[in-house]
Image: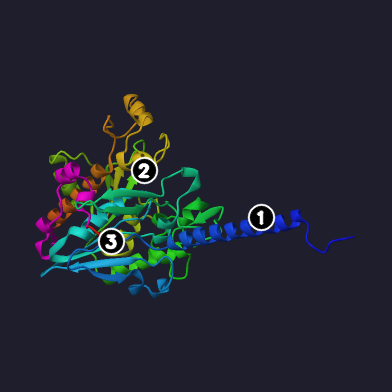
Amino acid sequence: MKSDSPRPGIKGGKITATVLLALALTVCFVTGREFAGSFALDAVFPAEGFEKKLLSDYFDGLKDHPMDTPVFVQTGAQPGGSALILGGTHPNEPSGYMAATLFLENARVSQGRLFVIPFANASGCTHTLPQEASPSRIHFSAANGAVRVFRYGARDTSSVVMWPTPDIYIHKSSGQELAGNESKNLNRAYPGDPEGTPVEKLAYGIMELLRKEKITLAFDLHEASPEYPVVEAIVAHERSMELAAAAAMELIGQGIEMRLEPSPKNLRGLSHREWGDFTETMPILMETANPSQGRLRGRTDEALALGGRDKAYLKAAGLGRLFVPYGESGKPLEQRVARHVTAIRVFLEMLSLFDDANGIVVERMPGYGDILEKGVGAYLAAK
């Protein structure tokens, strides 16, 4: 006689399937929430006096777009010029956005205006490139012991925002041809295009800020590998060269070696070229030496991003293959951030010396030795 009851094996299979389905849904929920959260930028805590704007306030084509990004401005009591500090053009170059963050969280402006964009390519902050095996985050301990976390992003705009990648990228205003992945690189997209790709719109928005706010002096902060010829260097447009030469000599006088390179006229799309050609600002791009950017590096983890120590680079230095000094102490992040912060301070001092009416005076920023001694975290605001 046949029984109408389900066989034990079938019943057990249904239970197993239900459990697996529940686990799959849980994984989807957790990873989906984490993915959605990646689009939120890292928390920053502006010093007193900073007003928050958005880049879309200068170009409404970015409004409600994932490429929009915060702009912070502080105005001093005394009139003067205006400076822009741009960090995060390439979010896998942490000294740039960390130096910008230190200005944002410490600066007091007494003359002129200071604009800070800590995360220029917000989309690049949301992901890493799998082929680079980079850490996803770096951590700092603030003075009160609180832990501050920042994303270690990617050089390129996320494919979630900009896809597909062309085989060849053609720079619109010059016709210059580059590899297709450069279409996702903010520092190949200037002067931008209000009707173009997301990256070209972002570049156009930054150009609009420079024009509408009549920015006197603008800094684009970067890092490069120790084997790259233009490293620990200032790259200056001809409009900026006199000021840059004075700043470089002052830095060298302080014991901070600094190369000075002219902006190439035949390499297009870069901030130090297009900002100077298409606005009235004096553009400056600066590079620090970061082993986690290089091709010789070994394991690419948070220790390398923060400490800058790699045995392959130590060997390369011994063989004379690097363009910067490299010893047992490596190239720690505090040194790289200190270079950017100190160089900007010197530029502002030289500007005030050359043209007091357009001077920009920023106080309360730590010195080079202070950052080396106490670390970056000591100058980050507590949560």
**Percent position (x, y) of residue 161?**
49, 63
Q: In terms of secondary structure, where does tag 1 sit? A: helix
Amino acid at the residue labelled 2: Glu
User: Is residue 205 highlighted in magenta?
Assistant: no
User: Is residue 373 highlighted in magenta?
Assistant: yes
Q: In the image, what residue occupies the spot 67% across and 58% down?
A: 15
Applied colour scheme: rainbow
The correct choice, above or below, for 307 with respect to 262 in the image is above
Nearer-N-terminus badge (2/3): 3
Nearer-N-terminus badge (1/3): 1
Q: In the image, what residue occupies the spot 40% across and 56% down?
A: 125
- Mark nearest the camera among 2 and 1 is 1
Quadrant housing residue 51:
bottom left
Q: In terms of secondary structure, where does tag 3 sit? A: loop
Quarter of the image with the N terminus in it: bottom right
Q: CA distance from mark 2 to mark 3?
A: 20 Å
Amino acid at the residue labelled 3: Val
* Residue nearest the observer in this picture, 273 or 134: 134
Q: Residues within 10 Å of mark 3 (few under 14, many from 20)?
A: some
Q: CA distance from mark 2 to mark 1?
A: 40 Å
Q: In the image, what residue occupies the spot 32% across and 66% down?
A: 70
Looking at the image, the residue that sits furthest to the top is 319
The residue tagged 2 is: 302
Q: Say the numbered circle drawn on residue 218.
A: none
Q: Say the numbered circle drawn on residue 44.
A: 3
Q: In terms of secondary structure, where does tag 2 sit? A: helix
Nearer-N-terminus badge (2/1): 1
Q: Which residues are magenta?
A: 352-381
The residue tagged 1 is: 16
**Percent position (x, y) of residue 80?**
14, 67
